[in-house]
Amino acid sequence: MKPNSVSVYPLADPAMIAGAGSAILKILQQAAGGSEDDGELQVDPNTGMLRFVRPSLLDTSEGALGKPENAEQAARRFLDAVRAYSASLRSADGRTLPNLLPPILRTTGLSIGVNSAGDPAHWVVRFTPLISPGLVPQSGLISMVAGTQKDNVAGQAGSLPAAATMPVIGSPGGRVLPVPPSPPAPPPAPSPELPVAPPVDVVNAIIDVRVTSRGSICALTSRWRPLAANEVITTGLLPEPQDEHANESETGPVIGYLVASDCDPQRFLAPYFLSLGHGGLVSAPASTYSLTALIIPVGSGEFRVMVSGNSSGQLRYGWAAYSLSQPEGGIVGLGSEDRVHLDPGIYNLIVDVMDLSTGAICRSESIAPVYPIESNGGMAGSSNPEGGG
Amino acid sequence: MATRKFPLAGEDTGNWSGECSLLTGAPSAGLVLRDVKHDNFSLARDMRVVRVWIGEDQSRPENWVSMRLGASNLPAIEDKIAVDAVDDPKDPNKAPPLELLAPYPRAREFSAKFNTPGAVLGDPASGDSQPLFITQRYLFTRYSLTPFHEPLGVLTAARVYPLLQFRYDARNVKERRRPRILRVDYRLEFALEPQVKMTDLVGRSFKPKSREGFNQASIILDPDTRPTAFSDLFAAAEKPLPTEAIGQGLRHGDKADWDNVHVWGALVGLLPSTPGVTHGCHLHWRWGAFMLVPGSGAVTVKGGPQFGRPAAGLVQSGAGLVDWRISDQSLRFAITGDANRNATGAWRASAGPSERVFDDLFTSEQPSLIKDGAPSIVIWLSFTIFRQQSDTLWDGTVMLPGIYFAHDPENTPIALGLGGSTEEMHKPGSVSGSFGWIRP
């Protein structure tokens, strides 16, 4: 029998991780067995993803590569050491630092890293995270305690600046979408004992550890978004979707978790029903934190967004666009209605959607042509134009 | 000459790294990228435009004018690499609008501008023709799943766009000499690391030699109708490409003989999945017509407008992915892997090689075997743009779809779910027998 509840994991505040960069660098250097001066760390301020490199080792070649299984063992020892060192660390204000690494890792493959001369220089041991959809394993995450979640979700919502913006990353000039502050989520009920479920895949999160032939760690690249320490939400499992691809799928829907692309905002590591087949991966929400959004044209220059995986609560939107033919005009905020209207032209249209009940957020982005398109492309218009950029 | 490594300290390049140089003087080559990596995974050793040709008559290449970016007949406007530059909208010679096919998240851009001192055809001071303005750009994007890079929507990748934008304004002037052909030749040298599955290596002795032939390539032609079986997903394929080859990618903006090239690093006998190539370089200039529209069946296609070409207010499925302003363009390509010729011989990057007849650069030699791998694979792209009307503004962007680079393991839920084939594919041809340069 399948459980009727599933776990959702709040993500750590990337700003807090970035703020703890010095401490994290020391952890990584210590775990890699290097000195204090050996190693550079980059923490993505929007996702908390880590990139650690020891340049002195990355480009050199220490001779023939060793056995791949030895490289894997060295990589796992390094990652275990990182977990152990970080478990006892706290931030300056006494908060427990987030879990920097996933609780479980599966070795997915290896690559051969070459140096600048093109010679084999090190192994790249590649891991895919796994996570429990039920009770969290003993690595440090525990069941939620009543009242704790409210504080943390409120803390995350309250971390929006007073100007009420959601960061929109990765396009020219930087982007922010004007969105009013969201109220804190209501406290969830205390969780009962949950059955232990086998761990499942976390999709789109790869962790690479580069290991020299002598077993030294020369780099860590993590596309994992760290989880908030000691937090998990237990929530109802949505019904399985009707499987339209039953004839093509080699497996029925399974539960997996998705990490958003590097540029997209995300607050929860949430579950989805995943169907595998010759179309790749088809996903459907498995909880009311598994928000998805899709921009759809409805005609006459109007665009709306189709949302699924949300609770029955209120949704909040933030739209923005820039003209593809006149990008020097910058990004224009287009308001917070559930729809937007554009004048003729061709645009890059973006919408962020937030579920105010849960705090879950997701993004959809699309090329939006509005016909007739003049040769100079036109400019974006809106029923609620706002400045932005 | 200007050179800068990237990223600089504190610079956000979306985890791309390498070196960007503006090569002027001798040998000039314009803006060049070297040692390009993403997340420390190697993509390219060298990327550059080797030549720009311009002429009046397609049938008379002997009369075409040859230009190298940064040379005296096409000098750089300033000896500086611009970063994330935006043209002044009031600049009468600004680059044409850059309308990429999808909003891939931009990270960083390097650019430089060039212009002929005067008339591009005839004496510069003659006024027989107008000047030619060129903006050369390398645009990098972040690693992302969306917008989809391919119609199945399963690959996470980052993109690099080696763009060339040109502007030739003949409005309200008398042209005594009218350029009708503009040709842009690229040399893109890829060198990727191989990846393997743990299960394939445990228990085997493995000692890779230095400079081992780690790189292989494939060329593929997509079908235009939705396949009824997954095995029919390709109308033609050579994977791995057995020998160096020359092929036709587009004819006057439309389908020709091949639609894409892939390069990957692999050990002999272990091929990446197709479709898939979750760790490899992808270069597509056309997608099969059915891939524009979402649909399910033997193959579930998520589709998207980025897999067709904007045309008169619509998106044209199955058309070449070219700038609609210059949709009448053809693409011819060559793939070489001979280590000596690519590195120190006639095809070396520093020579900026290009011939009036594209094939002539290669066909004086026998094509080398590259089936079992090469230290690097060079893809040569020759875009020929045909001018439709005189007395107009002739402008556009070359290499619009760019290149996308995925570096995820093969053994992930998405890749496994896709169920691509790791077998060789030689369809409709056969590996046996001798091959000349021209494929098919």
Image (spheres, rainbow, N blue to C red):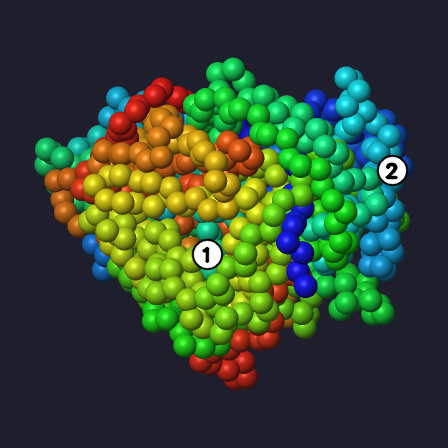
Q: Which mark is residue B150?
A: 1
Image point (42%, 71%), residue name: B297
Helix, strand or loop under label 1: loop
Using the image as rendered, state which of residue A323 and residue B130 is in the foreground. Answer: A323
Would residue A366 be found to the left or right of residue B409 on screen?
A: left
Please provide percent x and percent y for residue B46. Answer: 55, 46
Would residue A178 be found to the left or right of residue B73 on screen?
A: right
Would residue A63 be found to the left or right of residue B394 on screen?
A: right
Using the image as rendered, state which of residue A65 and residue A133 is in the foreground. Answer: A133
Image point (16%, 37%), residue name: B170
Image point (59%, 35%), residue name: A267
Q: Chain of mark 2?
A: A
For badge 2, the amino acid type reads Ala
Q: Which mark is residue A84?
A: 2
Whether tag 1 and tag 2 are in contact, CB under 8 A, the answer is no
Using the image as rendered, state which of residue B166 and residue B256 is in the foreground. Answer: B256
Image quarter where the C terminus of chain B lies is bottom left
Q: Is residue B366 visible?
A: no
